[in-house]
Amino acid sequence: MTKPFTYNINPARIVFGPGCLSQVAEELEQLGVRKALVLATPFQREDAERLSEQLGKLSAGVYANATMHTPVAVTDDAMQAYAHSGADGVVALGGGSTIGLGKAIAYRNNAPQLVIPTTYAGSEVTPVLGQTEDGVKTTVSHASILPEVVLYDPELTLSLPVNMSMTSGLNAMAHAVEGLYAKNRNPITSLMAVEGIRALRDALPGIAANPADLEARSGAQYGAWLCGTVLGTVGMALHHKLCHTLGGSFNLPHAETHAILLPHTAGYNAEAAAEALSPVAGLFGGSVGGGLYDFAAALGAPLALKELGLVEPDLDRAADIAVQTPYWNPRPVERDGLRALLQRAWEGARPA
């Protein structure tokens, strides 16, 4: 018999397909936006400026200072730019840093958001904002944070470097893996999670072999959308707590941290959530932690936290921070077990 469950559907308009970037103006007009501030990182400033030019009178200009982990100080600066530009909406062009900034603006002023992802992070379909202040990353969930429209144009990911494609895809996969054993999971999110993981498992090797493979790029965006939707619908657990700790307190890069930790956090929970994670074991050769590790290694993804600049003495502090107000997790979050997990992830050792 199916167990009782609750499923909340996050309202958003999804436009998917090569070339759909040309529909930005039309989508903004449907949202009722008269002038949109185009957001980007410094790295993608030129792309944002081209989009701004394409939008013509619908553009309120470009703010290209989006920063990893969404520092509150950057949001403060962006709010001033938003006010001075006369904007009444935002267009976020880029990955998690830019999408996070758009969410942070909308959380403060309820600005309509149109998001154009150029990575596979998946955060564009969640009502969750992670922001950093004084070295601490916190999350907040609110209806105003969820973007109203998301345009998935696989052509925009063709220039995403292979290494970033791999870590971004593994980041998305982590959302779905945790969604499978989430406390408030339901049959629909579990179906989406397995399909999202499968799509990324099939697409990422194709991108690694041929970065110009549009079919593989489309499959990865499809998988990222599904995994992100799972992230926005159910609660997260140990994996995301550790990533927020390492990102907010040690400034480790977001996607790479997710990619490295995924095999270890999934392996940590593999026995306690064996039934929920059985599809993952089936997709990766019968082993949850080991299978995910081998998959990441085959993609050439980073495998060790020390590669990201984290020093071994920081592992004790990271474990101490992570056990404070821990997220719900299927296996008890114990300091010694967590410290051992971090040691293996720091060394890059394969999970048992």
Image (cartoon, rainbow, N blue to C red):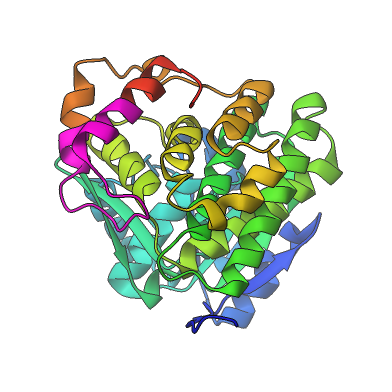
Q: Identify which residue, 277 or 297, lies in the foreground.
A: 277
Does residue 268 sit above or below 277 in this rendering? above
| Residue drawn at (49%, 60%) of the image | 231
Q: Dividing the picture into quarters, in which one does residue 189 lie?
A: bottom right
The image quadrant where one finds the N terminus is bottom right
Q: Residue 74: image x %, image y %?
A: 28, 47
| Residue drawn at (44%, 19%) of the image | 304
Image check: 315 left or right of 3?
Answer: left
Q: Which residues are magenta?
A: 319-341
Q: Is residue 185 visible?
A: yes
Q: Is residue 53 visible?
A: no
Does residue 124 sit above or below 335 in this rendering? below
Q: Residue 290: image x %, image y %?
A: 57, 30
Image check: 277 left or right of 312?
Answer: right
Does residue 41 sit above or below 26 in this rendering? above
Image check: 218 left or right of 136?
Answer: right
Does residue 180 sit above or below 258 in this rendering? below
Q: Identify which residue, 225 or 235, lies in the foreground.
A: 235
Q: Dividing the picture into quarters, in which one does residue 19 lie?
A: bottom right
Total number of numbered discs in the rendering: 0
Q: Identify which residue, 32 or 12, lies in the foreground.
A: 12
Q: Residue 248: image x %, image y %?
A: 26, 39
Q: Residue 249: image x %, image y %?
A: 22, 35
| Residue drawn at (28%, 51%) of the image | 131
Q: Identify which residue, 59 or 323, lies in the foreground.
A: 323
Give yes or no for residue 325 being in the magenta stretch.
yes
